[in-house]
């Protein structure tokens, strides 16, 4: 049995009051709160282990290195990758995609080539590709979606051709909550020998991720959205691809040998990890993954799915409610507007009731343009949210509505 009350005790921040009201934290798509287990493990590492990794022969350095590399193994297990060589630590999803866009672009993209991204991407999965396309004289093309917010696979079929170099697609939309059929996307792209990057920033916290089952070539996610610390993320890449790509940044750790004439590069994954990594954060991330795995990703998904269904039903009963994203496969993100109340007004007034939601374009301006709006209010759920909190949100919205 999934005991959400017990789970909440692991998150001290959830017992805070905001403006004298119990905090209702529904901004989990932006970042999640951290359980004690993560914070305490990181404090313990700073107090008792701290030393730079990979470089020292001394005891502490070796202990810190062991923790850091054990974290890589924890990530490998969490996303079911084949090998630790395929797990590159970065600062987050954004840096993972920038790394890939740069390295992949350098090695694989030429003038006249095409890069496909979906219309529902976060700016982090648009701008790095745009920058690379500009540099290389390539073209960025957009996979459209239906009015329900579902990716149009038939359109993708028609867009793939011999000029396509890579397809980049989010597994879960951070605005619409749509769960994209990325396995299908991968199958279609592979028919043309085209690799696929899956942006897993919004999927890794909510569902079992199996990169081998998806057969995706690259997968990116952020630690801070999976109950881990900020400043750490992951780029997964199939070894066969990563071997072919040049490094992203130069410096310590990514080298094998440096002379004035030339530098040879380290083996995978270190070739992509220049400089001192945030080894305390990687340890924190491992503890976060351990935490969610102990609860069971399937149990978390069941809990959040029930909560989302309940929220969609209750929110749908509010007069003037417009929900954006009606995909059949819907994750724990709900974007909405009520009547002609501006999203910023709604967010600000809900905040005064202790309810934290996100407002604005959610770093997806092209998607907002597709929807014909400037922004939405977004409630996004996590493993510790409850039906009582959904009720508080509904009651809060009703109060704001009455004020208008
Ligand atoms: N991709 C998606 C779908 C996101 O929702 C986000 C963050 O909201 C990102 C990428 C960027 O993540 P980060 O800021 O952790 O790099």
Image (cartoon, helix red, strand yellow):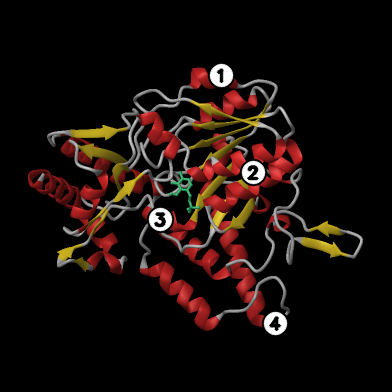
Q: Which residue is mark 1?
A: 157
Which quadrant of the structure image shows residue 175? Answer: top left
Q: Position of residue 316 (x, y in %)?
A: 18, 34
Residue bearing the label numbered 3: 292
Earlier sequence position, callout 1 versus callout 2: 2
Rounded to the nearest angstrom, the CA distance separating label 1 from label 2 is 23 Å
Secondary element type, mark 3? helix
Image quadrant assignment for residue 64: bottom right
* Secondary structure of residue under mark 1: helix
Q: Which residue is mark 2?
A: 101
Q: Nearer the viewer, mark 1 or mark 2?
A: 2
Determine which residue is flagged by label 4. Answer: 58
Sequence-wise, the earlier of marks 1 and 4 is: 4
Q: Secondary structure at mark 4?
A: loop
Instruction: Find out whether the residues at labels 2 and 3 contact each other: C-beta distance under 8 Å.
Output: no
Residue under the image location 42 percent in, 44 percent down:
207
Residue 299 visible in rendering: no
Q: Of the residues tagged 2 and 3, which is closer to the observer?
A: 2
Note whether ligand 1 is within 8 Å of mark 2: no
- Which comes before the other along the chain, label 3 or label 4? 4
Q: Position of residue 55 (x, y in %)?
A: 72, 74
């Amino acid at each position: 049995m999934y005991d959400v009350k017990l789970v909440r005790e692991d998150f001290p921040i959830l017992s805070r009051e905001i403006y004298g009201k119990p905090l209702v934290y529904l901004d989990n798509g932006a970042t999640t709160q951290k359980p004690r287990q993560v914070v305490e493990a990181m404090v313990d590492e700073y107090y008792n282990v701290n030393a730079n990794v990979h470089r020292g022969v001394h005891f502490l350095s070796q202990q810190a290195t062991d923790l850091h590399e054990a974290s890589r193994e924890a990530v490998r297990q969490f996303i079911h990758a084949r090998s630790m060589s395929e797990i590159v630590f970065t600062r987050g999803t954004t840096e993972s995609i920038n790394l890939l866009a740069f390295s992949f672009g350098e090695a694989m993209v030429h003038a006249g080539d095409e890069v496909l991204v979906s219309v529902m991407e976060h700016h982090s999965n648009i701008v790095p590709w745009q920058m690379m396309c500009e540099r290389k004289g390539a073209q960025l093309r957009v996979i459209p979606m239906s009015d329900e917010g579902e990716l149009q696979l038939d359109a993708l079929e028609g867009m793939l051709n011999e000029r396509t170099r890579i397809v980049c697609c989010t597994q879960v939309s951070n605005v619409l909550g749509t769960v994209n059929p990325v396995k299908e996307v991968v199958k279609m792209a592979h028919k043309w020998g085209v690799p696929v990057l899956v942006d897993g920033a919004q999927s890794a916290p909510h569902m079992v991720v199996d990169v081998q089952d998806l057969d995706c070539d690259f997968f990116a996610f952020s630690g801070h959205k999976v109950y881990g610390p900020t400043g750490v993320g992951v780029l997964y890449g199939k070894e066969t691809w990563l071997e072919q790509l040049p490094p992203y940044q130069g410096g310590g750790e990514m080298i094998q040998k440096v002379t004035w004439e030339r530098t040879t590069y380290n083996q995978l994954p270190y070739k992509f990890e220049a400089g001192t990594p945030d080894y305390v954060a990687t340890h924190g991330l491992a503890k976060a993954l351990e935490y969610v795995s102990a609860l069971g990703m399937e149990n978390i998904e069941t809990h959040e799915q029930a909560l989302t269904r309940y929220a969609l039903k209750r929110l749908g009963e509010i007069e003037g409610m417009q929900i954006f994203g009606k995909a059949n496969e819907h994750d724990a993100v709900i974007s909405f507007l009520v009547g002609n109340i501006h999203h910023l007004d709604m967010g600000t007034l809900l905040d005064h009731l202790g309810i934290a939601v996100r407002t604005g374009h959610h770093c997806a301006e092209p998607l907002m343009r597709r929807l014909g709006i400037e922004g939405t209010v977004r409630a996004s759920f996590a493993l510790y949210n409850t039906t009582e909190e959904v009720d508080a949100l509904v009651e809060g919205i009703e109060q704001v509505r009455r004020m208008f």
